[in-house]
C-alpha cells in the first residue's frame, strides 16, 4: 500500500491545488470558495493532518484563516462534516475532500448542526444578512494575502503551533489554537 505521503503526492500535488508539505502527515492546501456561492473569490488555507491509520481513519482538517459558516468553528477552524468525522471510508481520498465534500459544505450549510451558532441563527433568521456577512469575511479574511499569512507565527514558534489538531480528544490544543487565531 502507498504511504500517506505517496497518496498526497499522487492525489494533490498533481492537481491544481497549491500544497505545502510540512512533513509526511501534515500539510496545507489553498482552497477556493465555490463559484455561485457567497464564498466565491475567497481563498482559505486548510490544514490537513493524516493519522497513522490513514486511509482507514479520516484526516483532521481545519480552516486556518477565518470563515463565517454554521458548520465551521470560526476561531479553531474545525469542520463539522459527517462524511469526514463519522462516515469516512478508505475509498475516499484527499481529492474527494477538496473537490466534493468542502464545496458541498460551503454550498449547502446545515444550520441545524452548528459549530458556529451565530452563523446558523443568522442563516435561519435572515439569509440575506448571512450572505452579506459571509462576503464581508471573504473580503477581510480570505484574500490570497490573508491565506498566505494565515497561521504564520514568529520564527521561534513551531510551524503548526497556531493550528489545532481538530480531534475531539485534544480540547487543550483547540483552545490554544483558538486563542492564537484571535491574534491572526
Image (cartoon, grey):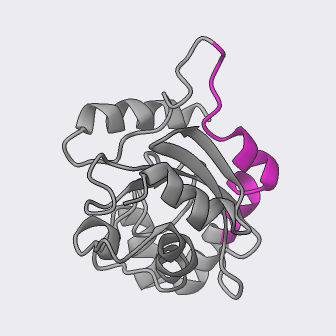
Q: Is residue 174 left or right of residue 41?
A: left
* Any part of residue 159 in sight: yes
Residue 16, relative to residue 112: is it above or below?
Answer: above
Q: Is residue 11 left or right of residue 169?
A: right
Residue 184, relative to residue 79: is it above or below?
Answer: above
**Start and end of the magenta stretch?**
135-155
The magenta stretch spans residue 94: no
Q: In which quarter of the image is the N terminus?
A: bottom left
The residue at 29%/79% (across/down) is 112
* Image spot of residue 27 (x, y percent): 55, 45
The residue at 61%/78% (across/down) is 131
Q: Is residue 179 left or right of residue 57?
A: right
| In-front residue for pair 174/99 | 99
Residue farthest left in this picture: 169
| In-front residue for pair 126/178 | 178
Q: In which quarter of the image is the C terminus?
A: top right
Residue farthest front in this picture: 1
Residue 93: image quadrant is bottom left
The residue at 50%/50% (across/down) is 5
| In-front residue for pair 98/176 | 98
Residue 75, relative to residue 95: is it above or below?
Answer: above
* Image spot of residue 61 (x, y percent): 43, 55
Q: Main structural element of the magenta stretch: helix, strand or loop?
A: helix
Give the mark count: 0
The residue at 59%/48% (across/down) is 28
Residue 144, relative to residue 98: is it above or below?
Answer: above
* Image spot of residue 37 (x, y percent): 65, 83
* Any part of residue 74 in sight: no
* Image spot of residue 69 (x, y percent): 49, 68
Residue 179: image quadrant is top left
Amino acid at each position: 500500500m502507498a504511504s500517506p505521503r505517496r497518496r498526497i503526492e499522487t492525489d494533490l500535488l498533481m492537481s491544481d491545488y497549491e500544497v505545502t508539505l510540512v512533513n509526511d502527515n501534515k500539510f496545507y492546501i489553498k482552497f477556493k470558495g465555490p463559484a455561485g456561492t457567497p464564498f466565491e473569490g475567497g481563498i482559505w488555507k486548510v490544514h490537513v493532518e493524516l493519522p497513522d491509520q490513514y486511509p482507514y481513519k479520516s484526516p483532521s482538517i481545519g480552516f486556518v484563516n477565518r470563515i463565517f459558516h454554521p458548520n465551521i468553528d470560526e476561531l479553531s477552524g474545525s469542520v463539522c462534516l459527517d462524511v469526514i468525522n463519522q462516515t469516512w471510508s478508505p475509498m475516499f481520498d484527499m481529492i474527494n475532500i477538496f473537490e466534493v465534500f468542502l464545496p458541498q459544505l460551503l454550498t449547502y450549510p446545515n444550520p441545524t448542526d452548528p459549530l458556529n451558532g451565530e452563523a446558523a441563527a443568522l442563516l435561519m433568521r435572515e439569509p440575506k444578512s448571512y450572505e452579506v456577512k459571509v462576503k464581508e469575511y471573504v473580503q477581510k479574511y480570505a484574500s490570497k494575502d490573508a491565506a498566505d499569512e494565515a497561521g504564520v507565527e514568529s520564527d521561534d514558534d513551531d510551524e503548526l503551533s497556531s493550528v489545532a489538531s481538530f480531534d475531539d480528544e485534544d480540547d487543550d490544543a483547540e483552545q490554544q489554537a483558538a486563542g492564537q487565531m484571535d491574534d491572526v
